[in-house]
Image (cartoon, rainbow, N blue to C red):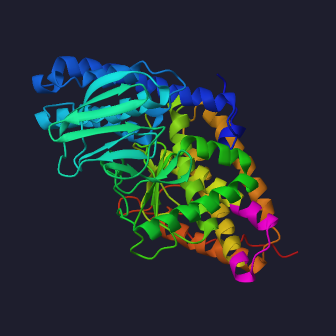
């Protein structure tokens, strides 16, 4: 399929292209599952094979396209762990845990599809069985890593093992006893601060466990941000609510406005700190979602030709150098953030102080995105789609720049000066090269002299 760059630079909604790119990710996951099934048969210890863990894997590999279980971010992370940890000699208990965790995915899929299932599984290290893709989990304290048997029949899940026994039905599910439920921002989007497989891959800024009231406030602020987004940018909102399924709360120990992270190997999950400001939460969500969207897109088209991952350049956002891919993803995220904030400013009345704060944010992002795009345009070897994609980014940047023309001139001048100071400190002269001890502008230049004029 020939991709339309305009719907990937900005929110394009749930189009046929969106579905096609999503299927590319799903096809990649199915291929990885087939490889995992072969690996379990040929390389796993006998103890892992004897537990019947392969039945869950086979069930997931044959699931219909309508089943979104293997699109879950925890499954993305499961695939990442398998590809990195099981390349050499792994301990027996790791094999049992890794492949046993698939039982939670298979059980959730079987319940949603109302299909029979019988497989071996392993409770996570906290003694829980998460039904990924639903808000439900079963909790068995003190039975971390315990092997269990899962059976789904007639819409009922049975869990049995030494010291472990439970029955669960989605139709009749209620919190209580061993049954727990994650808070939901909206159907299909949960707040997760406890799932071992989900939070294990969150390594930036620090996790936090929220009390009930704190978790409710966290979800309420996100809910308001998404509601505002549905009105301001419906196409972007549709994409985000289709791809995003998990929010992980983070500490904000440095008292920044917000801290957040997302990961190329956990697509569909955003980690962020709480804020009562829904516009700030929307800005954070858009920034991290754009990274996820690009990571999804890059499965279909790399945008930047392979072989350039080692090249680093000046970053308008940081003191250290960044790779071309990082510059591109940063420019894409901040372009979407600037556009959203500018449109919000045009649509709604705000207090003077808040209005100025948003203007500062937009003006700064416009300058920074231009700097990053210049580096990508000058130095990256782009694919055919990549050339169209970057060209469209320049066009959309111009549209946002025009929206700043009515901002106070002194505000715009202040942001230009701050960005210029950052460039002077970290870029080599007026290039997109990063200045460091090994690459410093030491060229001696004679002073400029005007030519002498002959007397007339």
**Residue nearest the observer in this picture, 295 or 188:** 188
State the extent of the magenta-drawn residues as a range: 341-355
Query: In which quarter of the view is residue 157 placed?
Result: top left
Q: Judge whether 18 appears above or below 286 on screen.
A: above
Q: Main secondary structure of the magenta part?
A: helix
Q: Is residue 211 magenta?
A: no
Give the image location of residue 335, x and y in percent.
65, 54
Q: Is residue 351 magenta?
A: yes
Give the image location of residue 399, x and y in percent.
78, 54
What residue lies at 67% left-to-right and 24% top-to-bottom?
2
Q: Is residue 304 visible?
A: no
Residue lying farthest to the right in this orientation = 456
Left or right: residue 112 versus residue 78 is: right
Quadrant where the image shows the C terminus: bottom right
Left or right: residue 340 versus residue 285 is: right
Quadrant where the image shows the N terminus: top right
Give the image location of residue 356, x and y in percent.
71, 78
Q: Judge whether 199 appears above or below 300 on screen.
A: below
Give the image location of residue 393, x and y in percent.
68, 46
**Residue nearest the observer in this picture, 386 or 244:** 244
What residue lies at 70% left-to-right and 48% top-to-bottom?
394
Query: In which quarter of the view is residue 297 placed?
Result: top right
Left or right: residue 108 versus residue 406 is: left
């Amino acid at each position: 399929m020939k991709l339309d760059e305009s719907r990937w630079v900005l929110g394009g909604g749930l189009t046929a292209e969106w579905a096609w790119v999503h299927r590319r990710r799903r096809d990649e996951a199915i291929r990885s599952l087939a490889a995992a099934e072969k690996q379990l048969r040929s390389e796993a210890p006998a103890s892992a094979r004897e537990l019947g863990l392969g039945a869950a894997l086979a069930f997931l590999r044959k699931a219909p396209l309508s089943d979104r279980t293997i699109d879950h971010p925890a499954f993305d992370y499961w695939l990442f762990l398998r590809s990195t940890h099981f390349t050499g000699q792994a301990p027996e208990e790791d094999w049992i845990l890794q492949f046993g965790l698939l039982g939670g995915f298979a059980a959730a899929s079987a319940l949603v599809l109302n299909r029979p299932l019988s497989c071996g599984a392993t409770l996570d290290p906290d003694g829980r069985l998460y039904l990924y893709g639903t808000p439900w989990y079963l909790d068995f304290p003190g039975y971390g890593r315990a092997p269990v048997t899962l059976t789904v029949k007639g819409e009922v899940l049975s869990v049995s093992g030494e010291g472990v026994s439970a029955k669960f039905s989605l139709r009749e599910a209620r919190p209580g006893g061993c049954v727990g439920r994650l808070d939901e921002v909206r159907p299909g989007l949960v707040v997760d601060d406890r799932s071992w497989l989900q939070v294990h891959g969150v390594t930036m800024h620090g996790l936090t466990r929220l009390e009930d009231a704190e978790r409710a406030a966290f979800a309420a602020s996100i809910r308001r941000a998404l509601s505002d987004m549905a009105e301001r940018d419906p196409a972007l909102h549709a994409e985000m609510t289709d791809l995003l399924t998990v929010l992980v709360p983070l500490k904000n120990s440095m008292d920044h406005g917000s801290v957040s992270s997302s990961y190329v190997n956990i697509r569909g999950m955003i980690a962020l700190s709480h804020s009562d400001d829904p516009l700030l939460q929307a800005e954070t969500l858009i920034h991290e979602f754009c990274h996820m969207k690009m990571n999804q897109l890059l499965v279909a088209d790399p945008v930047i030709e392979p072989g350039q991952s080692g090249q680093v350049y000046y970053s308008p956002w940081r003191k250290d150098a960044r790779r071309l891919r990082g510059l591109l993803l940063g420019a894409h995220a901040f372009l979407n953030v600037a556009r959203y904030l500018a449109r919000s400013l045009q649509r709604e009345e705000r207090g003077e102080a808040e209005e100025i704060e948003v203007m500062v944010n937009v003006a700064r992002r416009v300058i920074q995105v231009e700097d990053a795009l210049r580096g990508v345009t000058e130095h990256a070897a782009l694919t055919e789609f990549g050339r169209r994609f970057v060209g469209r980014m320049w066009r959309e940047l111009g549209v946002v720049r025009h929206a700043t023309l009515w901002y106070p001139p002194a505000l715009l001048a202040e942001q230009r000066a701050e960005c210029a100071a950052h460039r002077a400190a970290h870029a080599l002269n007026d290039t997109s090269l990063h200045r460091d001890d090994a690459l410093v502008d030491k060229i001696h230049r004679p002073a400029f002299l005007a030519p002498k004029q002959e007397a007339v």
